[in-house]
């Protein structure tokens, strides 16, 4: 094999050899960058603790639970019509250029609809925009029209003689789901209402209904609300407003998981944390092996050619 490699190297012109070395080193740099990125992701998954929704700190965190559809019309994948939490699809057309053929994407879209993630302590709404989705169900089939007339079960799997290829990825409802992203709780807007404004509105309503006001607060039954009676009405209104605000304060806020604004990864995965870490570490190993092979090839080519 070494002799064959040396013979191959000698057949190259100096310019061709240098070009091949440059391409190989560039590819090696790319695989090294990819491997280091995978390693950083693995460490991120390991170092981000899993939180319960009820006690999760505001900010970057990891949640683990089950995906659920929100109330209202269900989310449906565009190509199959299957109910799901999230979908991504593409339609590709087979393009011929001389003797070569390749697939060209003519349609692609990703779901941005909200869904929920539940754990034993609460619920969090998930906004999937910008998420890297890992472990989703993937189906690929072929057909003769820009939109599939048949589903994956009836369509062609191999694509022989078919002009179009359809790909659909989905996360099924009630799937086990790991979410790593930015967690924030939006309080009920009523809990921040100014108590004085509420009090003024209530007293204004009472003043407009003089008959009810007198029936309730005219203690001496003289047909007038004097200063002492009005003060009693004001204290009663203040107590009612306080009770209403206290009740509103007990209403839980809306929890939301979304893409971080600082560039940190936003991950939605049907795989658990251990599986994610293992996958990324294998990616890092393969990337480092490819980097070493590429570097070794470039070095051997330089040595064989005496460049």
Image (cartoon, rainbow, N blue to C red):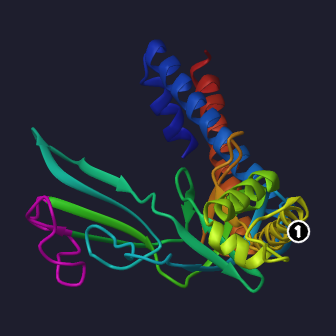
Question: What residue would you read off at disc 1?
Answer: 232
Is 13 positioned to the left or the right of 38 in the image?
left
Q: Quadrant of residue 45?
A: bottom right
Pick whichever, 18 or 71, lies toward us: 71
10 Å crowding of disc 1: few (<14), some (14-19), many (20+): some
The stretch in magenta equals 142-163
* Residue 242 place in picture, x, y as percent: 84, 68
In the rendered view, tell whether residue 268 sits above or below residue 108: below
Pick whichever, 264 or 203, lies toward us: 203
In the rendered view, tell whether residue 61 sits above or below residue 100: below
Whether residue 145 is in magenta: the answer is: yes
Whether residue 135 is in magenta: the answer is: no
Pick whichever, 225 or 192, lies toward us: 225
The C terminus is located in which quarter? top right
Count of numbered badges drawn on the protein? 1
Q: Residue at x 57, y 21 (%)?
A: 305
Q: Residue at x 62, y 47 (%)?
A: 290
Q: Quadrant of residue 98?
A: top left
């Amino acid at each position: 094999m070494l002799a064959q490699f040396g013979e191959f190297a000698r057949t190259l012109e100096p310019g061709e050899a240098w070009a091949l070395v440059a391409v190989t080193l560039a590819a090696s740099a790319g695989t090294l960058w990819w491997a280091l990125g995978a390693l950083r992701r693995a460490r991120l998954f390991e170092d981000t603790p899993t939180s319960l929704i009820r006690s999760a700190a505001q900010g970057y965190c990891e949640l683990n639970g089950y995906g659920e559809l929100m109330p209202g019309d269900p989310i449906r994948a565009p190509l199959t019509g299957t109910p799901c939490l999230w979908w991504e699809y593409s339609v590709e057309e087979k393009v011929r250029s001389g003797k070569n053929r390749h697939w060209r994407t003519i349609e692609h879209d990703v779901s941005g609809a909200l869904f929920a993630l539940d754990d034993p302590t609460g619920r969090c709404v998930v906004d999937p925009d910008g998420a890297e989705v890992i472990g989703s169900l993937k189906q690929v089939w072929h057909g003769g029209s820009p939109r599939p007339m048949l589903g994956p079960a009836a369509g062609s799997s191999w694509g022989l003689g078919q002009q179009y290829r359809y790909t659909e990825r989905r996360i099924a409802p009630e799937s086990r789901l790991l979410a790593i992203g930015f967690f924030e709780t939006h309080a009920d807007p009523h809990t921040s209402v100014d108590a004085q404004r509420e009090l003024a509105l209530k007293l204004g309503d009472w003043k407009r209904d003089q008959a009810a006001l007198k029936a309730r607060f005219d203690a001496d039954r003289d047909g007038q609300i004097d200063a002492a009676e009005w003060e009693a009405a004001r204290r009663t209104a203040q107590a009612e407003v306080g009770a209403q605000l206290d009740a509103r304060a007990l209403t839980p806020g809306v929890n939301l998981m979304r893409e971080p604004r600082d560039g940190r990864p936003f991950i939605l995965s049907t795989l658990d944390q251990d599986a994610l870490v293992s996958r990324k570490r294998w990616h890092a190993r393969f990337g480092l092996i490819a980097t070493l092979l590429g570097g070794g090839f470039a070095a051997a080519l330089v040595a064989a050619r005496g460049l």
